[in-house]
Amino acid sequence: YNFMTVESSPGPPARYFVGVRPPQDITEAIIDVQKNIIKDKEADLRVPILPHVTLLNPFEAANLDYFSLVSAVGEVAGKNRPVDIRFDEITLLRKRALVIESSEEAGANLGLLTLRRALESAVIAEEDATDSLPHEFKPHITVFQSNMGCFVPDDVMRRVQDELSVTLPVQFSVDTIDVYGRVGDRNYVPYEELPLGISK
C-alpha cells in the first residue's frame, strides 16, 4: 500500500470510511482469486477496493474538517486495545456481496464491534446507502460485489470457496486502523494509519 498524505494528494477528499487492513499474505491471496475470476465475470461482478474490514461505512464529514476528523478517529484509536479478528466462513450477503466473515452469530470479533461503536460516537457521519449494501453490521472482508441488477453467480461462490478455503480461518491481530479517502468513483485509498493505543 502506498499511503497518500494531504501534501501529496490533490487535497482532502469529500468522502471517507474507516477500516482495517488484513496482513499482506491474506491480501495477496484474495487479490489472486479476484484476478483469476473477474476476467470471466466482468458482466456480473466488480472488485471492491483493496481487501479491508470496514469499521465505518463511507460518509461525508459534514461537520468536521479533514484534520479534525483524523484527530477524532486517532483519539478513539488511542483509547482502545489492539483486537483479534477471526473469520472462518465464505458466504453471501443478500446474494450481492461475496464475503469472508465469522460463522458465529454472537460473540465473534467483539473487539471490533466495540471499536466501531466508539468511532460512531466520536465521528459525525452521514452514511450514504448507495455506497454500501444495507445489512446489519457484521465484520467481514468483501471479495466481490455484484454489478447493478446482478447477483453473485453460484459458480463464482464455488470457485472462491475452493480457492480460498486453504486460507481459513483468517486470523490476525489489529493494532492500527486507517482513514480512507475517496479519490474517484468508488475508489478509496488509505490516507492515515492510526495506532491503537493500549497494549494487550
Image (spheres, rainbow, N blue to C red):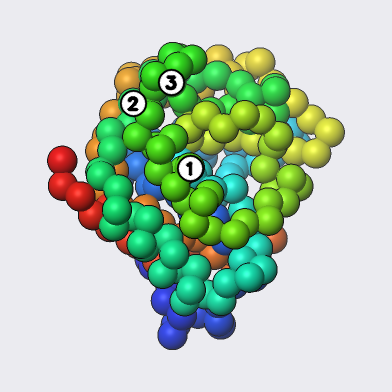
Mark 3 vs mark 1: in front: 1
The amino acid marked with disc number 1 is Arg
Badge 3 is on which residue? 102
The amino acid marked with disc number 3 is Ser
Q: Residue furthest right?
A: 149
Residue situated in front as seen by the camera: 7 or 34: 7
Relative vertical location of residue 7 with respect to residue 66 in this rendering, above or below: below
Of the image marks 3 and 1, the number of the one nearer the N terminus: 3
Q: Is mark 1 on a helix, strand or loop?
A: helix
The crowd level at tag 3 (other Cα within 10 Å; few <14, some 14-19, many 20+) is many
Residue 95 seen from this side: yes
Of the image marks 3 and 2, the number of the one nearer the N terminus: 2
- Find residue 85 and report its horizontal and vertical position in percent: 33, 31
Residue at the image position 44 percent from the left and 47 percent from the top: 118
Q: How many labels does the image show?
A: 3
Badge 2 is on which residue? 86
Cβ–Cβ below 8 Å for labels 3 and 2? yes
Cβ–Cβ below 8 Å for labels 3 and 1? no
Q: Is mark 2 on a helix, strand or loop?
A: strand
Residue situated in front as seen by the camera: 63 or 96: 63
Q: Is residue 129 left or right of residue 15?
A: right
Q: In which quarter of the image is the C terminus?
A: top left
Residue at the image position 70 percent from the left and 22 percent from the top: 95
Q: Is residue 3 left or right of residue 157?
A: left
Residue situated in front as seen by the camera: 113 or 15: 113
Residue situated in front as seen by the camera: 163 or 129: 129
Q: Quadrant of the N terminus?
A: bottom left
Relative vertical location of residue 124 with respect to residue 62 in this rendering, above or below: above
Badge 1 is on which residue? 117
